[in-house]
Image (tube, rainbow, N blue to C red):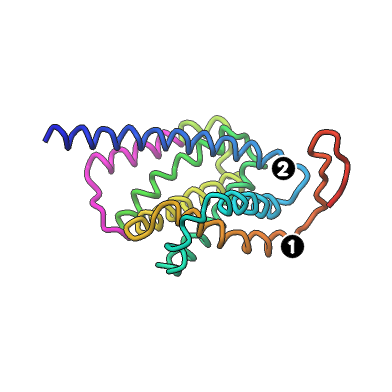
């Protein structure tokens, strides 16, 4: 029993570390998206994000080829990435139009959506502590954002929808991880979202100025 408890504690700590790294990545991505959106369209930002991700998985994803060839649960991957791509698009609009503090306050509603969707789709029990935490979290978010932005701001509504989309995407991920490795889920995300980003970016393509890099002035 003691070994099991130690193992569970280790998993808990590991989970917290991954969550912390994820939050740091989100902050970096939001700052980068805001800077890029000053010269590129939001659709282009999403496309180049996926393109850079493709470069990474080409280098590190070869070991996953046997798993990827089976295309296990492809329809679920597709549904997950359609939801995630739309949520990402709405979230990026919010990052551009709202103060970052307000965006993150609104994004903290995501656990509320996760709890709701887990109850609806995964049949997870809504225990009293979970219900209390969900309601408290929602009230806390309202307290945080009320002084900073008007709730009638359309961009705030878009970020709330994005948070719901991210929550639903996490439910898809939880289901996928029963049969698919986390690394394969990331690879499928890039493979599916790259063409989505390309098609979307062609509707509002703007010249890409390499002047964003110091001492360069060419245009693509």
Residue 202 badge: 1
Q: Which type of secondary structure does the marked residue at label 1 adopt?
A: helix
Residue name at image x 40 percent, y 36 percent: 139
Residue pointed to by mark 2: 36
**Label total for image:** 2
Mark 1 surroundings within 10 Å by alpha-carbon count, few (fewer than 14), some (14 through 19), many (20 or more): few
**Quarter residue 29 falls in:** top right
Q: Nearer the viewer, residue 148 or 105?
A: 105
Residue 133 badge: none
Give the left or right position of residue 53, taking residue 120 as reference: right
Q: Position of residue 105 (x, y in %)?
A: 50, 36
Q: Nearer the viewer, residue 26 or 161?
A: 26
Give the left or right position of residue 161, taking residue 218 as reference: left
Q: Quadrant of the N terminus?
A: top left
Vertical position of residue 40 compared to residue 11: above or below: below
Q: Magenta stretch?
A: 121-141
Specify the principal SS of the magenta part: helix
Q: Position of residue 72 (x, y in %)?
A: 40, 67
Q: Does the magenta stretch include residue 136?
A: yes
Q: Nearer the viewer, residue 26 or 6?
A: 6
Mark 2 surroundings within 10 Å by alpha-carbon count, few (fewer than 14), some (14 through 19), many (20 or more): some
């Amino acid at each position: 029993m003691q070994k099991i408890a130690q193992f569970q504690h280790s998993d808990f700590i590991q989970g917290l570390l991954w969550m912390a790294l994820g939050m740091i990545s989100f902050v970096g991505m939001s700052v980068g998206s805001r800077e890029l959106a000053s010269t590129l369209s939001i659709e282009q930002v999403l496309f180049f994000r996926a393109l850079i991700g493709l470069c990474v998985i080409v280098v590190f994803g070869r070991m996953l080829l046997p798993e990827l060839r089976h295309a296990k649960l492809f329809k679920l991957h597709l549904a997950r990435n359609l939801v995630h791509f739309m949520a990402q698009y709405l979230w990026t609009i919010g990052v551009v139009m709202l103060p970052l503090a307000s965006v993150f306050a609104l994004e903290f509603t995501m656990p509320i959506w996760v709890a709701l969707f887990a109850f609806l789709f995964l049949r997870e029990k809504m225990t009293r502590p979970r219900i209390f935490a969900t309601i408290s979290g929602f009230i806390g978010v309202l307290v945080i954002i009320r002084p900073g932005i008007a709730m009638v701001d359309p961009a705030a509504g878009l970020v709330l929808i994005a948070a719901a989309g991210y929550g639903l995407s996490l439910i898809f991920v939880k289901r996928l991880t029963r049969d698919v490795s986390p690394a394969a889920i990331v690879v499928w995300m890039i493979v599916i979202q790259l063409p989505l980003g390309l098609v979307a970016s062609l509707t509002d393509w703007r010249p890409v100025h390499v002047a964003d890099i110091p001492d360069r002035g060419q245009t693509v």
